[in-house]
Amino acid sequence: MSSPADVTAFGEKLDDRDAPQYGHQTDILYVKVAAVLVVLTALEVWASYAHWLGHATLAVLLTLMAVKFTLVVLFFMHLKWDSKLFGRLFWAGVFLAIAVYVVALSTFKFFVKS
Amino acid sequence: MADITADVAVSTPVPARTGNGAGHGGGGHGGGRGDGLHMTTTGLSNNKLGMWLFLGSECLLFGGLISTYMLYHGRTQNGPKPSQVYDIPFTSISSFILLMSSLTMVLAVSAAKNNDTPKTRLWLGATAALGSLFVGGQVYEFTAFYHEGLGFTTSLFGSSFYTLTGFHGVHVTVGIVMLISVIAITFRGRIDGDRAEVIELVGLYWHFVDIVWIVIFTLVYLIPS
């Protein structure tokens, strides 16, 4: 049985929640992630000039953007190792923002006077 | 029995992790339980929780601004079109600079965690310098666009572009002020405990500014209209 001090107000066990402790990461890992980000950025710029990609350009650029975004959030902002509560707060904001974008664009697309 | 435990847990403050180190991560805010520097019912740092909540709300701010730009970037009236003013190679270099500033920032947090004050100052200074370079580039870009006929009130495209990228630039500038302030704090004493958390919080803000630019760079500059 857990002692009261081992359980948070959200019912999470402190040891379980924090099992992947911060501190495993080394500076080398950060440099590697940064290198990947640079390569992905170069690929993005290349894709924006690669007209032969046609309509696939959009998909390629959005995918690369999403990968870069996720890498920074998981590794540089440490959400990969951090409390899930922080992640929930942040991703809620991200998905709500995407919803706002979709609703706004849909509104102007379908309800604007022609 | 479990219910009783849960009830007690809600009413019994749990020591926050406020040990040594900048403590990114779960352990982030700290080393062991029981340091008792301050107590929270979540077992997490309230400052860090507040910062994440703030960043979540910032997503909505930039979501609205980006949506507005996407709606209006084709409304150029008599002014220049995006493809006529954008300088992709220049903006790519700016993006590279901001990405590198994220690396130096995370290295600063890592150094702070290891109580390595000289390295912390070095990486914080490098981050502030790279951030300043980015803002300088943005000022240059705005000036160039203005001379090419794209003012704030020239068209809906101009208004939404300057508002979006201007807001981002202001965020970067605020981040630079925060970095310089943190460097000043390091000269007042060792970076440990709660002071180390300040560096972590500034780091979270800085990385957020970076990911917003990742989105802006792709949606605004790279995706053809």
Image: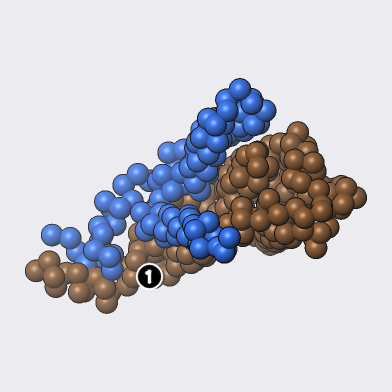
Chain colours: A blue, B brown
Q: How many discs mark residues in the rendered view?
A: 1
Residue nearest the observer in this picture, B219 or B175: B219
Q: Is residue B30 left or right of residue B109?
A: left
Residue B182: give x, y in percent of width and height.
Answer: 67, 59
Measuring 72% from the left and 49% from the top, which residue is drawn there?
B131
Q: Quadrant of residue B77?
A: bottom right
Residue B34: give x, y in percent of width and height.
Answer: 35, 62
Measuring 19% from the left and 69% from the top, which residue is drawn there?
B6
Q: Quadrant of residue A41?
A: top right
Residue nearest the observer in this picture, B222 or B16: B222
Residue A114: give x, y in percent of width and height.
Answer: 58, 60
Q: Quadrant of the N terminus of chain B?
A: bottom left
Measuring 21% from the left and 74% from the top, which residue is drawn there?
B8
Secondary structure category for the residue under label 1: strand
Measuring 14% from the left and 73% from the top, which residue is drawn there?
B4
Q: Quadrant of the C terminus of chain B?
A: top right
In the displayed structure, B93 sits above or below B164; it is above
Q: Quadrant of residue B84?
A: top right
Residue A59: give x, y in percent of width and height.
Answer: 51, 35
Q: Amino acid at mark 1?
A: Thr
Q: Is residue B154 visible?
A: yes
For disc 1, the marked residue is B40
Residue nearest the observer in this picture, A72 or B149: B149
Residue at mark 1: chain: B
In the displayed structure, B130 sits above or below A85; it is above
